[in-house]
Amino acid sequence: MNVIPKMVMECRADGRQDHALIDLGSFRSESVFAGLELEERRVYVNSLSPRQMDALTAVCDTFLPSITLDSDINSDDSILKFYKTSASMARIPDQLGGCMSNKLKHPKLWLLRLTLWMLSTCIGTFILCGMRSLRSSFPYMQSFSQLSQQRREDIMRSWSLSYFSLIRMAFNTLKFLILLVFFTQVDEKDENQSWKAIAYCGPDPEFKKRKGQSQSLNQLADIFVNADRQVQQEGPREDKEELFGPLYKGLIHLEHPRELVAQRLHRSGFPVSLHPHKFGKNHHLSHPSLIIQCDAVVVGSGSGGGLLAGILAKAGHKVLVLEKGSYCARNNLTLLEGPTMDQMYLGGGLLATSDMGVVILAGSTVGGGSTVNWSASIRTPQHVMKEWSDRYKLELFESKLYREAMDVVCERMGVQSEMKEEGFNNAVLRKGCDELGYHVQNIPRNSPPDHYCGWCCLGCKDGKKKGTAETWLLDLVRSGNGVILPSCEAIRVLHKKKKGRARKTASGVAFQFEHKGIKEVCIVESKTTIVACGAMSTPILLKRSGLQNSSIGKNLHLHPVTMAWGYFPDETAAAEWPEKGKKSYEGGIMTAMSTVVANFDSSGYGAVIQTPALHPGMFSAVMPWVSSTEIKKRMCRFARTAHIFALARDKGAGELVSASTINYTMDEVDEENLKRGIEKVLRILAAAGAQEIGTHHCKGKSLNVKQASSHEFERFVKEESRRALRDLSTPICSAHQMGSCRMGVDPNYSAVNPMGETWEVENLFVADSSVFPTALGVNPMVTVQAIAYCTAQSVLDVLRRKKDRFLSC
């Protein structure tokens, strides 16, 4: 049956998309092609009042005003234009208004709205801004937009250092959002008017060239019209995977007609019940749209869920994977920072703790964090395995099975430690450590030695980075025993009380998806259920499902990170190093690491030193803002500014109250470890040859190393590394979250048992970083997969016993 051509023709005939896989008439170059799906970029409607928008525009132009440079000083037109462009000229207030109205989900969002309303009034401006807002003549009071540029900048600086934490919070939030949006927004050509001035090329040039040589729209239409026939034909699988993505045969998109979805599921071996649907009515749990049956349902497709799904499917079990995020095939990534954060990160990349003290990045796409992480594939450290085994009585981590698990997952991901060429940031880290005699080592990566790519945080353009979408999920699809449902959200784990059982037993999952404003609920009935949504989402789902274990949502560790920077002017680069023309955003993101302050040989609690991926948006958002001129000058140095960070294995822990309410307070010990790390980082940057160094503290102090005396250098390093990190004066980031459903041997102190099964519900397993007993201290991907591998053996035992009981009946 040739379904797809029929559906495309119906779309063309009546203009409707209800029964279409794609509306070719609305195809745009920036659309995200996911298997057989094209996803438009999200547009957010602005609901701020005119008064709030007036204040927001003034605030935006305070951070990024129009500045006229003397053309004799710099003849580069792109730089002159960059300085001349204000935030309002780039329509940042409108975009930010839409973001605040729809995208931001934070318990302190009211504070931002209240701040803007107060700044739109004379009295409110006086309350928030004090004497700086007063005029010397009548009328003495003014609203914020009526103040001069200099006064507004003075006020913003005072906010960054305010005694009141709510004012510091408001400053940090506005600064972060304004700069992030300004440097990540793109026009219809996928370009940003500031990029040329800051020497940023946008998406990987090689990737852009390859996309430019891809098929025309007419060719793409022909491909879609013949897609069903093409899937059935024999031919090079590699060609199809290059176009549709390696998982194309296993993806089922739920916005298609339900009959087509049911047919695809049935053809894949999943029994399906289709329920009548009244047009315009939302389905609910008692009246689901579809009921699907399978052996195992896996919620989440990241490092844990993807691995478990692949292993179960290869063992012959029917596995259904539910993924909240969408699927982006290699050829249809954008490698644009803003759109990618919006589409492939949890919360659109705008997730933070309740006090805005920590900015949190977590993947939310097919493949989870393994799709957008930085390739580091470090085995569980020996001292961590010993602590988890001895202190927490988890014998698993000293077992032969666990070591086998690490070997298996590293082999499947192709983990190796070599590189043909090192990127700018990592070369700076390595050279500085070598000069100072600090220990430095290669970071094992799940990519080959020639993988010189700085855009992997935005998805891997060629599949060389072996995340779960290129490994375990591929096993799932090729086994013929599994399918993936992207863009759907699990709303409840279903469980029931069985006669003669002390605990409830998991029976499946209810999930929902939205299409054309209508929410539909479906049910998966399964023999076993695995939740692997990640440490930020798994506890929320378990709580919503009625689980009441006191450890669910608590013990959240974030691996807090703080950074320092060093500027290496291109024109003064030595002939041999650092190479002239090298850019900070190019090359492997992580290839070098120092454990000089990691305390691996003692307590195991310290800080590792590594390098980040910072494209213009995040770079601008974490750099200190001390004036509008200074931030634009810093951004013009973006491409030759190296960043190195210290990452603490945190003893302090937080709690997930809800999806948007994340309480976390850094422990004093963790703060001290980060300070020790930053002290080493500043020395590393200077030893590597940086002309200027600094931290992200809001005062924005820096030191010209070439002109400073040794005494001035030591004083600077001491002062900057001793600054407080828990008072919102320095941006703290987190790319690793763990521990929120920790594993243990006692239900009073843990959420899951040593097999990964929840204490409260039988046959309900958790397989992600939330099961870590403590913070890990290094990049967690290998540890997540190794634990999930062990959990998979327990799940296989459950399914084997169920099969044996069925056969004996």
Image (cartoon, helix red, strand yellow):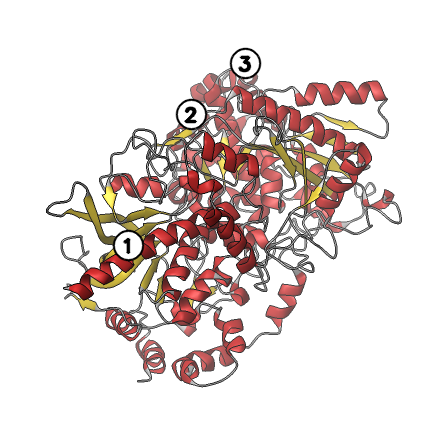
Q: Is residue 621 left or right of residue 244?
A: right
Label 3: how many residues lie within 10 Å, few (<14), some (14-19) or many (20+)? few
Q: Nearer the viewer, residue 773 or 351?
A: 773
Q: Residue 300 at what x, y percent from top left?
A: 38, 53
In the rendered image, which quarter contains the C terminus?
Answer: bottom left
The residue that mark 3 highlights is 131
Which residue does the image show at 83% across and 42% down from the upper left?
Answer: 72
Who comes first in sequence, dot 1 or dot 2?
Answer: 2
Distance (Cα) linking label 3 and label 2: 16 Å
**Helix, strand or loop status at disc 1:** helix
Q: Is residue 743 left or right of residue 172?
A: left
The residue that mark 1 highlights is 798
Who comes first in sequence, dot 3 or dot 2?
Answer: 2
Could you say which disc has been placed on residue 118 in the image? Answer: 2
Above or below, comparing residue 688 to residue 332 in the picture: above
Q: Residue 402 at what x, y percent from top left?
A: 47, 47
Q: Amino acid at mark 1?
A: Val
Q: Based on the displayed image, in which of its 4 quarters is residue 464 positioned? A: bottom right
Distance (Cα) linking label 1 and label 2: 60 Å
Most distant residue in the left direction: 499
Q: Residue 766 at what x, y percent from top left?
A: 35, 46
From the image, state whether disc 1 or disc 2 is nearer to you.
1
Q: Amino acid at mark 2?
A: Met
